[in-house]
Image (tube, rainbow, N blue to C red):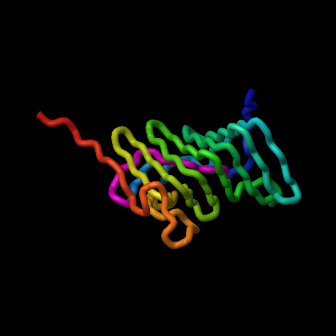
Amino acid sequence: MLARRRLPGAAAGAFCLAALALVPGSVTAQSLMNHNSNAPVDYAADRIELQDRANRVLLSGNVDITQAGLRLQAARMTVAYRNAGSIEIERIDANGGVVVTKGEERASGNVGIYDFNKRIITLIGNVALRQGGNTLNGGRMVIDLTTGRSTVDGRSAGGAPGQTGSAGGRVSGTFSVPKRD
């Protein structure tokens, strides 16, 4: 059974994809700017390992993190923190079937990175974004939590030239169209 715990620190993370308006290669996420990144972060995992000297926590096995209506799931996550009198989360690296959800929106990828200092969330490898009937696929998605702007490209970050995501190096998707009489 998964035990639910709370990650310490006021800077605990925002993995938000709410209110996405899809535009080819670009995503506007209005509510990203309004997500309470100071809300407590709760976590559950099959196993936790505290590496105090390295200032990190390793979570493995059905890892589930929630914060203010946002949910991040993956097989493994590493939480890097600094201890400045209190624990402050600096970065979370997630891998193994990464899924980020808020409300009806769902984004997934092979790897997820949240950089608290830059306020950026990045999904890498076989990125898929679903909002209602709209879909968006690519190799990498970068979400800027300061501006609420997200970009998607076909090539996975850090890959060699020619290495692509699931869309053959291009961004692809489907827009739903309202029913007309």
Residue 174 horizontal/vertical position (percent): 32, 47
* Of 67 and 50, the residue lying toward us: 50
* Of 61 and 180, the residue lying toward us: 61
Name the residue at 65% across, 51% down: 94
Tell how many labels: 0
Give the image quarter of residue 60.
Answer: top right
Q: In which quarter of the image is the N terminus?
A: top right
Name the residue at 73% across, 30% down: 2
Residue furthest to the bottom: 161
Residue 171 in the magenta stretch? The answer is no
Name the residue at 46% across, 49% down: 128
Residue 105 horizontal/vertical position (percent): 45, 41
Q: Give the range drawn in magenta.
A: 12-25
Side (left or right) of 24 relative to 71: left
User: Is residue 161 shown above or below 56?
Assistant: below
User: Is residue 4 shown above or below 83?
Assistant: above
Residue furthest to the top: 1
* Of 47 and 17, the residue lying toward us: 47
Side (left or right) of 67 relative to 17: right
Q: Quadrant of the C terminus?
A: top left
Residue 130 horizontal/vertical position (percent): 42, 43
Give the image quarter of residue 53.
Answer: bottom right
Name the residue at 48% across, 69% down: 162
Residue furthest to the left: 181
Secondary structure mostly seen in the magenta stretch: loop
Residue 30 horizontal/vertical position (percent): 41, 51
